[in-house]
Image: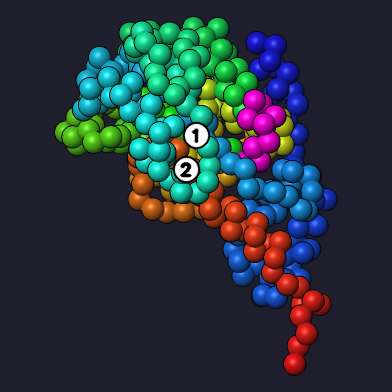
Amino acid sequence: MYLLENISKNIYSLDKNSIQQAKDRLDTLIKPKGSLGKIEDICMQLAGIYGTAKFDTSKKAIIAFAGDHGVYEEGVAPDPQDITQLQFPNFTKGLCGVGALSKFVGADVIAVDVGVNCDHKLDGVRDYKIRKGTSNMAKGAAMTREEAIKCLEIGIEMAEECIEKGYKVIGIGEMGICNTTPSSAIISVIDGCDPAIVTGIGAGLKKERLKHKADTIRNAIELNKPNPDDGIDILSKVGGFEIGSMAGVILGCSANKTPVVLDGFISYAAALLAYKINPKSREYMIASHLSAEAGTQKALEMLDLSPVLNMDMRLGEGSGAALAFNIIEASNYAYQNMATFDEVEWV
């Protein structure tokens, strides 16, 4: 708990002077003011995060976490639960979506098991297993408050380890069959909306099963009564180990003045938990893409974030975050290398 409290106390708003310096340069580049749109927004945000008008975004990593969920036994997902343990090692081998895209953009992938339902160590995966999956939130709390704090602190530790190794931009990813269920629950609790509004098909649930999924979430919320103003309580009652760990990365990056690139729907839930723990953490988030999953708009509205890309993606894993890395690097390159009006000889 000390690590979580210490990190949360050390998250500050972005450096306004650096933001203004970046804006001043952007406004003098040979283009109409504001004409590069989100490219300019990204550069100003990065300047504010790093506290300098010149910055390096070349060393990038995705930190991905995997965990299984007790609520799987309620029939809220169409796929076998062991896909989590079968797929997760592919993250670091470059064989799945986030693996291939990360390799393409020159980013490293760090895979961390925080709750996969297996006894053996997964190949190429860091073992921080809390236990073999959460409890069934339809029958009680998904985890204890102590476990919720533990997964948050694992995320903080992983973020700080990467930052110490020189990573300048960090994305988050995940793996966990049926984890759209706790994510929808988290978003429903924080927004105060009916779960049906923010519950989608996930990895391919048949539409006729959507009502059952939303009903399961509604019943879990009614049973556990998570406090919508307490991020740790929400996580412990209806969350997941991998979701909490992603929230921890966000908090760790924020306290260490490092941008954190969100992926899709599951990461939005994690971002909302981080926001509840410390609202200033939102200033360090970059939303990579507009997930096709239901509930996306609700989550992004609450976070007041505008995604960089709209690709109709709903894979998860960190694939959208990896894809956005190139946009971030392109933004920085243009910002650093375009000429200003004063530097160009006009004929």
Measured from the top left, where is residue 230 in percent x and y?
Answer: 57, 19
Where's the N terminus, which quadrant? top right
Q: What's the amino acid at mark 1? A: Val
Q: Is residue 190 left or right of residue 30?
A: left
Measured from the top left, where is residue 98 in percent x and y?
Answer: 42, 39
> What label sits on residue 109 in the rendered view?
1
Which residue is situated farthest in the bottom direction here?
Answer: 347
Q: What's the amino acid at mark 2? A: Ser
> What label sits on residue 336 in the rendered view?
none
**The quarter of the displayed image where residue 27 is located:** bottom right
* x 25%, y 14%: residue: 73
Measured from the top left, where is residue 206 in percent x and y?
Answer: 18, 34
Q: Is residue 14 visible?
A: yes
Q: Where does label 2 land, which residue?
A: 102
Measured from the top left, where is residue 171 in percent x and y?
Answer: 54, 38
Where's the C terminus, which quadrant? bottom right
Whether 148 is drawn above or below 49: the answer is above
- The crowding category of the residue bearing disc 1, from other C-alpha atoms within 10 Å (few below 14, some 14 to 19, many at least 20), is many
Range of residues picked out in magenta: 160-169
* x 45%, y 22%: residue: 125
- Residue placed most toward the observer, 45 or 162: 162
Q: Is residue 226 visible?
A: no
Q: Is residue 281 left or right of residue 14?
A: left
User: Are the residues flagged by discs 2 and 1 in contact, CB closer than 8 Å?
Assistant: yes
Marks counted in the figure total 2
The numbered mark, 2 or 1, whose residue comes first in the sequence reads: 2
For residue 71: magenta?
no
Whether 21 is drawn above or below 343: the answer is above
* x 45%, y 38%: residue: 318
Kind of element beneath mark 2: helix
